[in-house]
């Protein structure tokens, strides 16, 4: 029987609760589809700081490198905010992304019909939205140097550098074009080329790579306009290709089109080695440990892991069917709008419903 190694990073806050749900479902789905999964739980983020003093212990990174895929829940808690930046949980996540070479972050946003009423936008605006944010993940202003903070002239100056090389833009652009070619064939590259030199390079390279994908229709949009168009007419987008910081911001905005960020999965991929699969939402410390979390983004991330990380398409579809069924049956965690006939459930009960809803 094919067996895969999955490094499981539960992390902080609601992480352990939603990880437990995802693990149970992955076990059930793999048994149904004739392969087995070996889980290797490792600490990361605040949990790792508590256990080892650092947010990404060398053992955790090594375990991730040796795995077939990595499933991460969420990291971060307010009690670590006072630590120096490089010792905070978030730095562990950035080091993990960069240590695994995960330059391509895929964040699909698809309206689930049963939840259309949960959006803050009118149903006719969001109906049929199905877009994919392709965010560059290990470059740009998140990682650029010089960066720092210095005292000067009796004041303080702090700075970061937004930097991309042609090579970094080319490789993420190819991912964007390839994915667009497999969808509706439209790529919108988002930048700020009217102001930033780094964005002009971005635009020039995306144009150049377009020659390799003539069947894909390419457009460019300034990031401020893209932020507006996402709420004005989100259906116009198929694939949005953008840099690290712009992608961070736009993917939160796009996520909210669905009415809850608790629904959205993501995949982070490199050119070789395992991919990292994680919900777009954070660790929600305010509701941690209270059985209130929505495990669906985590479960859909597990489905992406099966599809993209392990090429187990049928198993991924099984998991997604269970999600559709449970939502259609009206089960809702606290973050989701209650409609007529809906039943309020906690994290664990949502997990039980998903398990019961798995197609045979
Ligand atoms: C995300 C998060 C992270 C990011 C933080 C936690 C470092 O907001 O995955 O979008 O900014 O990339
Ligand atoms: Mn973010």
Image (cartoon, rainbow, N blue to C red):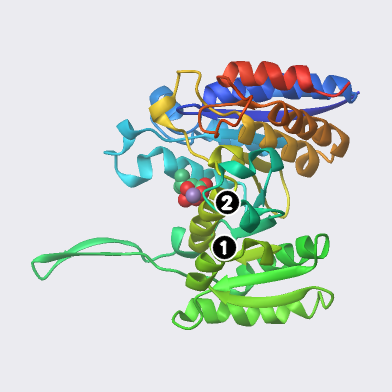
Instruction: Indicate the quadrant where residue 153 lies.
Output: bottom left
Which residue is farthest left?
154
Instruction: Indicate the quadrant where residue 343 lies.
Output: top right
- Identify residue for label 2: 257
Q: Nearer the viewer, residue 340 or 283?
A: 340
Residue 212 screen position, x and y as percent: 81, 76
> Relative to 162, is 311 above or below?
above
Classify mark 2 as within 8 Å of ligand 2 or not, answering yes or no. no
Residue 58 screen position, x and y as percent: 52, 35
Which residue is farthest front?
340
Q: Residue at x 67, y 47 (%)?
A: 111
> Relative to 29, is 266 above or below?
below
Q: Is residue 246 visible?
A: yes
Asked if the residues shown at circle 2 and circle 1 are in contact, with their CB atoms under 8 angstroms apart, the answer is yes
Q: Residue at x 74, y 33 (%)?
A: 324
Q: Nearer the viewer, residue 339 or 260?
A: 339
Q: Quadrant of the N terminus?
A: top right
For residue 278, side relative to residue 158 (left or right): right
For residue 130, side relative to residue 74 (left or right): right
Say what secondary structure mark 2 lies in. loop
Mark 2 Cα-neighbour bin, 10 Å: few <14, some 14–19, many ≥20: many
3D distance between C-alphas at marks 2 and 1 = 8 Å
Q: Residue at x 78, y 21 (%)?
A: 357
Mark 1 Cα-neighbour bin, 10 Å: few <14, some 14–19, many ≥20: some
> Relative to 285, is 143 above or below?
below
Residue 137 screen position, x and y as percent: 57, 56
Q: Nearer the viewer, residue 100 or 334?
A: 334
- Identify residue for label 1: 230
Earlier sequence position, callout 2 versus callout 1: 1
Q: Residue at x 62, y 62 (%)?
A: 234
Residue 79 screen position, x and y as percent: 31, 31
């Amino acid at each position: 029987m094919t067996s895969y190694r999955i490094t499981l990073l539960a992390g902080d806050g609601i992480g352990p609760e939603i990880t437990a749900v995802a693990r149970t479902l992955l076990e059930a789905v793999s048994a149904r589809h004739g392969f087995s999964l070996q889980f290797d739980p490792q600490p990361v983020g605040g949990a790792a700081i508590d256990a080892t003093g650092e947010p990404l212990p060398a053992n955790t990174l090594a375990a991730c490198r040796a795995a077939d895929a990595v499933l991460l829940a969420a990291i971060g808690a307010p009690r670590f905010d006072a630590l120096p930046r490089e010792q905070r949980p978030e730095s562990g996540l950035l080091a993990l992304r960069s240590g695994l070479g995960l330059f391509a972050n895929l964040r699909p946003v698809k309206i689930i019909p049963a939840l259309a009423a949960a959006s803050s936008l009118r149903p006719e605006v969001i109906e049929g939205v199905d877009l994919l944010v392709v965010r560059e993940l290990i470059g740009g202003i998140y990682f650029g140097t010089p960066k720092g903070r210095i005292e000067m002239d009796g004041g303080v100056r702090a700075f970061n550098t937004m930097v991309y090389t042609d090579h970094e833009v080319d490789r993420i652009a190819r991912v964007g074009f390839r994915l667009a070619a497999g969808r509706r064939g439209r790529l919108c590259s988002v930048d700020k080329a009217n102001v930033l030199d780094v964005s002009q390079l971005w635009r020039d390279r995306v144009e150049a790579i377009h020659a390799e994908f003539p069947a894909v229709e390419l457009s460019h949009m300034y990031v401020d306009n893209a932020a507006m168009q996402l709420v004005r007419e989100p259906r116009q987008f198929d694939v949005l290709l953008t840099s690290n910081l712009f992608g961070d911001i736009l993917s939160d905005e796009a996520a909210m089109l669905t009415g809850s960020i608790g629904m959205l999965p993501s995949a982070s991929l490199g050119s070789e080695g395992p991919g990292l699969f994680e919900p777009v939402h954070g660790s929600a410390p305010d509701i941690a440990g209270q059985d209130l979390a929505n495990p669906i983004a985590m479960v859909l991330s597990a489905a992406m892991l099966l599809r993209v990380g392990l090429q187990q398409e049928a198993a991924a579809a099984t998991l997604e069917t269970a999600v559709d069924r449970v939502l259609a049956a009206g089960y809702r965690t606290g973050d989701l709008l209650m409609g007529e006939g809906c039943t309020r459930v906690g994290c664990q009960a949502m997990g039980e419903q998903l398990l019961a809803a798995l197609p045979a």
